[in-house]
Image (spheres, rainbow, N blue to C red):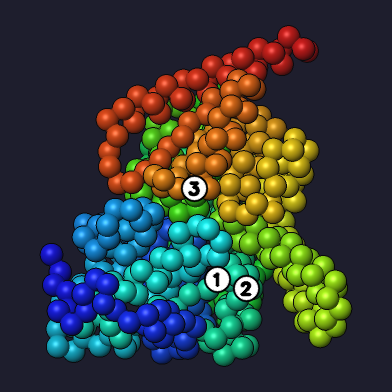
Amino acid sequence: MMEASPALRPGSPTFHRLSEGVKHVEISGKTLLIPEMAPFASHLLAACFRALGTNAVVMDTYKGLSLGREFTSGKECFPCQVTLGDILHHLQKEKEHWGTAFDPARYVYFLPEADGPCRFGMYNKLQRLVLDRFETFKEVPIVYISTQNGYSTEGLMPPEKASTLRRLSYVSVILADVMDRTVWRVRPYEWRTGMTDAFMEQALQAMAALIERVGAGLELHRLYALLEDIVATAASFIDPHQPRRPRIGIVGEIYLRSHPDSNQNIVRQLERFGGEVVDASIGEWVNFITFVRARKLQRQWKLAWRSRDHKLLRQIFRQWMANRIESIYQSWRQNQVYRLALKHLDIEPDHSVSALERRLEGGRLFNFDIGTEAALSIGGALEHVHHGFDGIVNVFPFTCMPSTICAAVLKPLLDQRKIPYLDAPYDGAIQPNREVALRTFVYQAGQHLASRRAGQTLRH
């Protein structure tokens, strides 16, 4: 058990710390501590920061879960407990390593946030209060980027570097998505068990090292060339004699679906029981944030127009144009990267957010104006079904509001279409019937695939 400072008790911290200790601060010359979420994406993001002169470290994950639980009540969203445990575990290790030379001012904790009803927006506030309970950790600032301004990086580093970071980090996220999808396409059919994971671990290290060397100059063609080589090599690992498995799409809360330890390695489990899995991408989430910001600006424009506030209209127009340019850039880069990969391997292309909206609006099922990632999950699940997937899994933290909404909409809808569907909530506990539920679900997905193939044969 870690010993908290007697000077700061629960309920006593002053609220000014929420603005003083959680803010945009200059990170140059600091060690930036990044929680691991999606392994490929987290490590490539850290490489982007290092390319621009900031020492970024991806912290060990899930080793401090007991600490995260010790300083929370259990009512929090599960990812909050995991990330809190990660930072406490890492700082405690650093303190033990450096002893009296430990200097909290050399570290910055990177924890993004979201606006809206999701509890994710409060993680860094709660964790600020917890860190303040330890005299040795009080001076560790928490820096964030927010969905509210489209994950702007202004204030983290000088403007010219911030602009480069934004473009480089987006491309790195898409590279990581493609590497993930390469693994999921190849690993179930590999010639020898473990060869895909071993190769992709080396590929991750090579890509991170290359980003560090050429990222500051935005030499993206070199990153693309390496990605092509990685995908082409991995494609050769597929045993062509193995029949195609039922394809299973994972949707749900972004952290849980992307963090293997928190979701108890559900992708590997589904593969072990006979499925081929495609998880929703990180790039889809980033594109969603840009898409939602455009809708917010359009609503603000209408209000400003009604009040004839011309100064505000000009301000909103400039923001809308910047957001539009961002959207075009994202679409261009994402299509570039996927086209390169698809030349060598038939990975699943990513969904466009506008296509998800059309899918929802066409069936009058949900609306993006409602907010939350429920719209993304419902639309993503329906897109998977439209493209011939044989099952959908909704992965989320126990009590997650958006994912509960998603389950309420998807479960009856997919039942009508006879598509196997499974809710997979997590809070760190091992459910005794989990393996049976996953095995049964994959069996049902296999039956759906067989039925689909039989129907196609009859039609021909």
Apparent side of residue 1 relative to residue 137 in the rendered image (left or right) = left
* Label 3 element class: helix
Which part of the image, by quadrant, shows the C terminus? top right
* Residue beneath the point at 27% across and 38% down: 430
Which part of the image, by quadrant, shows the N terminus? bottom left
* Label 1 element class: loop
Q: Are marks 2 and 3 in contact (CB under 8 Å)?
A: no
Q: Residues within 10 Å of mark 2 (few under 14, many from 20)?
A: some
* Label 2 element class: helix
Instruction: Name the spot of residue 343 as percent of width and height, x first.
Output: 69, 48
Apparent side of residue 215 relative to residue 395 in the rendered image (left or right) = right
* Residue beneath the point at 35% across and 62% down: 83
Q: Circle 1 is placed at which residue position?
A: 146
Instruction: Name the spot of residue 231 as percent of width and height, x first.
Output: 57, 50
Q: Are marks 1 and 3 in contact (CB under 8 Å)?
A: no
Where is 180 relative to 152, above or below? above
* Residue beneath the point at 68% across and 42% down: 366
Nearest the viewer among 139 and 133 is 133
Name the amino acid type tagged 3: Met
Query: Label 2 to label 3, Cα distance in Å?
Result: 23 Å
Q: Are marks 2 and 1 in contact (CB under 8 Å)?
A: yes
Q: Circle 3 is placed at which residue position?
A: 401
Tell me if I can see residue 408 in this picture: yes
In this view, the residue farthest toward the top is: 458
Q: Residues within 10 Å of mark 3 (few under 14, many from 20)?
A: some
Nearest the viewer among 140 and 191 is 140
The mark found on residue 149 in the picture is 2
* Residue beneath the point at 59% across and 27% down: 412
Name the amino acid type tagged 2: Asn
Tell me if I can see residue 230 in this picture: no
